[in-house]
Amino acid sequence: MNTSTDELTPLLQRGYEAGFVTDIETDQSPPGLSEEVITRLSETKKEPRYLLDWRLQAYRAWLEMKEPHWSIAAYPPIDYQAVSYYAAPRSVDPKRPKSLDEVDPRLLETYRKLGVPLHEQAALAGVAMDAVFDSVSVATTFRETLKKAGVIFCPFSEAAVEYPELVRQYLGSVVPYRDNFFAALNSAVFSDGSFVYVPPGVRCPMELSTYFRINAAKTGQFERTLIIADRGSYVSYLEGCTAPMRDENQLHAAVVELVALEGAEIRYATVQNWYPGDEEGRGGIYNFVTKRGDCRGARSKISWTQVETGSAITWKYPSCILRGDESVGEFYSVALARHRQQADTGTKMIHMGRRTRSVVISKGISAGHGRNAYRGMVRMAPTALHAHNYTRCDSLLIGPHCQAYTIPVLEVRHPSARVEHEATASKIADDQIFYCRQRGLDEETAVHLLVNGFCREVFQKLPLEFAVEAQKLIAVSLEGAVG
Amino acid sequence: MNNEQPLLDVRNLWIKAQDQFILNGLDLRIGLGEVHAIMGPNGSGKSTLVQSLAGHPGYTIEKGEISFDGEDLLTLTPEERARRGLFLAFQYPVEIAGLGNGYFLKAAVNAVREARGQTPYDAVEFLKVFRELAPLVGLGQDFLERGVNAGFSGGEKKRNEILQMLLLEPRLTLLDETDSGLDVDALKLVARGVNATRSKDRSIVLVTHYQRLLDYIDPDVVHILIKGRIVRSGTRELAREIEREGYEPLLTAMA
Ligand SMILES: Nc1ncnc2c1ncn2[C@@H]1O[C@H](COP(=O)(O)OP(=O)(O)O)[C@@H](O)[C@H]1O
Ligand SMILES: [Mg+2]
């Protein structure tokens, strides 16, 4: 980076600290999507034939599908032929670096600046990290430690080659490629994400984490993550994501599939901080994501926690299929929309097994001209004897121009199933701020306290370091939102 | 009143809210270590006075001067006033449901301590201080976990105000009808808290329209505020006179 941009960057970033660009030579596929592009992508990744076939089937299905427009988000048409579907730093060896010492220092520096140092001695205690940069994984830490416990944690591309039986068995088994338009697109063109397998009875000894970074311009990111918790196992996983500040919109269409077998538990947390666009709504990531967990075995449990502060548009409904008897699904969410951000997010809890239980706690914060919708579905199938759901949606409005919506759908097909739903909407009142100021707190601190208080229930579900991060992120995102 | 510069000096204060004058040339001087009572009928401007002193943005100062400890109060933000030791116990304490009371109290006390150049309390120190002070107003530790004033009874809210006063150790305390709506037991707890804070370098203003509170807290001066001005000042005896005869004779005399 030259001096003039260096001087400008802090000014431009104002509130979005991850907005910098890493200056690095990149191999990028030309814009456009076709069977040929997909075939080349699969070849670059040296994928087995089964995967290419699957991609091509997905692509053909996608061609027949229509982009969904039922969300509250309004945006100009997306030109899918103008997007580049693969970008990777030239210095990343497709056969993968053997150790961190071989990773391009500019990449290491990028992650250090983002607050997620990759060197094991510098890393967050007890967290193993897979670092994905544009379309490729650049490093995965603590693999040896995990391997000793029998846990597989590696980039998806590697899993496709090394563990083809597992990938073939589970890929698309929770989110089939026909599921929806964006899932089909992802299935056709997906690049790295993480693959996790926890063997029966194993409690994963570390937090697993993936950090997704978009760097290249005019590209999309289409990661795919698959987590399988075998019988009686436990794993906690966290993803973070950021992108540079750019005036054009960038597409991000991910798919995450979770499978919990009998008695297994998966905790999945997201701190989503994609570039949200500027005050006028210029730029920002279009975040169209399909996340679904399948509680396939009895007494299994899947818990989603998300803190969504970034993206120009968020379209995302992490869901649980509660198939196993007595399985449990949870969804804890904080979604923030300010400036011109549009967030349409929520969950689906599909109760099929007996005595299945689910909890949904959603906290929506709207400020500026932000628009925020909670969209949730609770379905109690005819087989869901004595199933129970509790849902609470709270909305907090800051300022007169923002909007909040709550759109719950309930389908109850068995009389013994119980569904409870509560919703509140509140404003940060001037009197509350004055009260805090009279006690010596400045206005900004007062707003942070009020907002953190509002989000507390959800932040408590995050691993400690990330809860602190999430708090800071909300604070930074709301800078100047009041007053 | 002593001859030193008063802690609070209000001169010819004219205040408007929504285009209407509420205070009309009010004068008030409070010396260090003094306890003053301000009495007056409903709607006479008592809350307007104390809210304006605290810097509530809803009131416009049209005219007048206020000095606090020799400094021009009107140039200070509400938080700066608080950090310099001005404390208002609200007539209607504000509810903040999601915010933990303990977290809030600690943040407030540390903001004020830092402004005074004292080291902020860590969690352990804060808890220790809380445990010393809370029993004075009859509050237990469970109360730290609840939301700020959220779902509190009227009495609990008022006692929470007094607890905050004790924690923040203000130089000037303004109590806005802290006695209203309290039963005798709660009133005694509040009075005990206020009396505990009385000292030669702290001043207190009790806003009330009953003289009942004055049975427990003995004021140095009593003022009568009517229609936005102090119309009479005197001793305890003045409060007794109002209790006997009401405000009518004063209002008639003004008309
Ligand atoms: N923010 C405000 N806007 C408009 N009028 C107000 C406001 N605050 C107080 N008033 C009016 O000013 C008068 C004095 O009110 P207040 O100071 O609350 O009296 P007190 O505390 O003595 O009962 C009342 O007539 C009241 O309606
Ligand atoms: Mg009043």
Image (cartoon, rainbow, N blue to C red):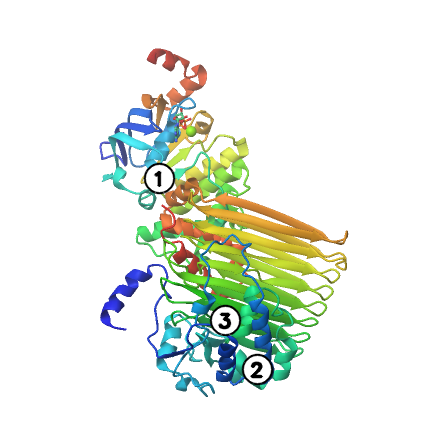
| Disc 2, SS | helix
Tell me residue B170's x, y (percent).
35, 43
Q: Which image quarter holds the C terminus of chain A?
A: top left
Q: Are marks 1 and 3 in contact (CB under 8 Å)?
A: no
Amino acid under label 1? Ser
The residue identified by callout 2 is A160
Rendered image: mark on residue B199: 1
Q: CA distance from mark 3 to mark 2?
A: 16 Å
Circle 3 chain: A
Residue linked to disc 3: A222
Query: Looking at the picture, which amino acid does disc 2 mark?
Result: Ala
Q: Mark 1 and ligand 2: say if the CB distance to the nearest ligand atom is below 8 Å.
A: no
* Three-letter code for the amino acid on which mark 3 is drawn: Phe
Q: Is residue B68 visible?
A: no
Task: Please tell me whether mark 1 sits on a helix, a strand or a loop.
Answer: loop
Q: Report which quarter residue B185 is drawn in.
A: top right
